[in-house]
Image: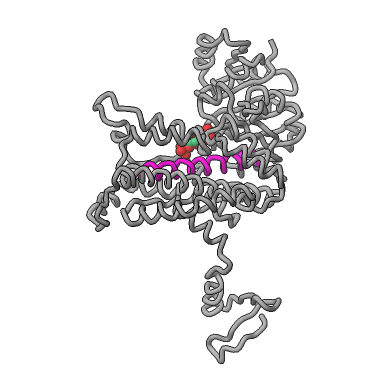
Amino acid sequence: TTAQIGVTGLAVMGRNLARNFARNGYAVALHNRTAARTHDLVAEFGEEGVFVPTETAKEFVAALERPRRLVVMVKAGDPTDAVIQEFAPLLEPGDMIIDGGNAHFADTRRRERELREQGIHFVGAGVSGGEEGALRGPSIMPGGSEESYAALGPMLEKISAKAEDGAPCVTHVGPDGAGHFVKMVHNGIEYADMQLIAEAYHLLRDVAGYSPAQIADIFRTWNTGRLDSYLIEITAEVLSHVDAATGKPFVDVVQDRAEQKGTGRWTVQIALDLGVPVSGIAEAVFARAVSGHAELREASRELAGPSARPLDDAAAAAFADQVEQALYASKIVSYTQGFQQIAAGSEEYGWDIDLGAVASIWRGGCIIRAAFLDRIRAAYDTRPDLPGLLSDGDFAREIGEAQDDWRAVLVQATRQGVPAPGFSAALAYYDALRSARLPAALTQGQRDFFGAHTYRRVDREGSFHTLWGGDRSEVEA
Ligand code: 6PG
């Protein structure tokens, strides 16, 4: 049999993606560094569709119909380059290598350029949705040439998740690294969403005094409204889970040190380079870092804090409603920032990314899937040149309605000594955007004072410098 697509790298993501293709009627060639995995897959799931197991790179390539579609599902970084080096010499012009890992978009740009010289299409494709998504339908963010998308897109559309309106959660994001860039920002937003949810939980627990099980119920209620999302849903599951060994809430027996594989950190690093203020995502990355500094935290346990002021039942319930507002408003801000970063990346690299289409393919399959994304899609579809989500009338109105409660939550958090870096960074961003004048004018004055860095005036064109060390007259720079 000739296979229509091949998957090399059969760890859990690769295996499930291969099964997804097979379940959708495609003949799938299989390859893995150690052949045992390949045979295990066929033994276990062979009846799901047509699999063509192969043991060598040569056999694998020979099993594929042309142009060849070769999906690489190995660890991002050096292993990806090693696989490319192994297979590229065996391929012919027009063939496609699809990297479905969490690669850095700069690596994807380099690989695409190198392979293009050989006439091979390199498709850096972000794939989100974890193990279940890979098997039952992920959200897919492919970059690369138009030509490769023409040959690959229909298959990806078939295996991808479908949004509620039936639209496949995949689109040709843009050339070279565009797909992996968008996947990177997806993960940054994922970090921010998770952090905001964690802060809501922390406040409901330590300010309102609710138990994990009660908070799970609160999240379940929220999940029936505008916060309806996969992450809120699984949060309720995690919070209501009880540890079998101790009978305690599961969340109380897990060490409170968050780990990361790095995509959130990349998002912030790139945002710094692009000059995009993704403060919500940055606080989420830093919050994980703070949690990991066990020794410093241990050494700081005796630092003074406010005395607790327990809320009565009515006040706790009212506070929970306010936390919902704060969470929603902060979420609008982190998506505003994330989409701004995609717009900036698109501009910098000439990708011409359709922001509405990105929101559309995040509606299903991926970790940040949410009802909310349909509204973002609508906002960009109505106005593709929207300067930012907060300029959309509906989002502006909602955040305006939420802002009093949002502030009240932060007052409580501050008063009771519960950190809420995500909520407060988001509010600071909102207030900065709203401000008619920012103290940046003073910053400019300071820069001019110590470094003659010059400033612009509100009333005249040109750059100016004040002779601070002399008579303080102004000169045109
Ligand atoms: C996804 C996830 C996936 C992975 C995260 C975890 O979109 O399916 O984002 O890519 O689970 O990268 O990231 P951390 O280990 O950095 O939290």
Looking at the picture, does residue 26 appear above or below residue 166? above
In percent of width and height, residue 73 lies at 57, 28
At x 52% / y 76%, what residue is drawn?
446
At x 51% / y 45%, what residue is drawn?
331
Q: Classify residue 85 by image quadrant.
A: top right
In percent of width and height, residue 59 lies at 64, 16
Residue 92 in view (yes/no): no
The dominant secondary structure in magenta is: helix
Question: Of residues 296 and 301, which is closer to you in this image?
Answer: 301
In percent of width and height, residue 467 lies at 58, 86
* Residue farthest to the left, as pictured: 302
In percent of width and height, residue 38 lies at 54, 16
Which range of residues does the magenta coloring cover?
178-202
Residue 201 in view (yes/no): yes
Question: Magenta segment: does it hold 399?
Answer: no
At x 56% / y 32%, what residue is drawn?
366
Figure colour scheme:
one colour
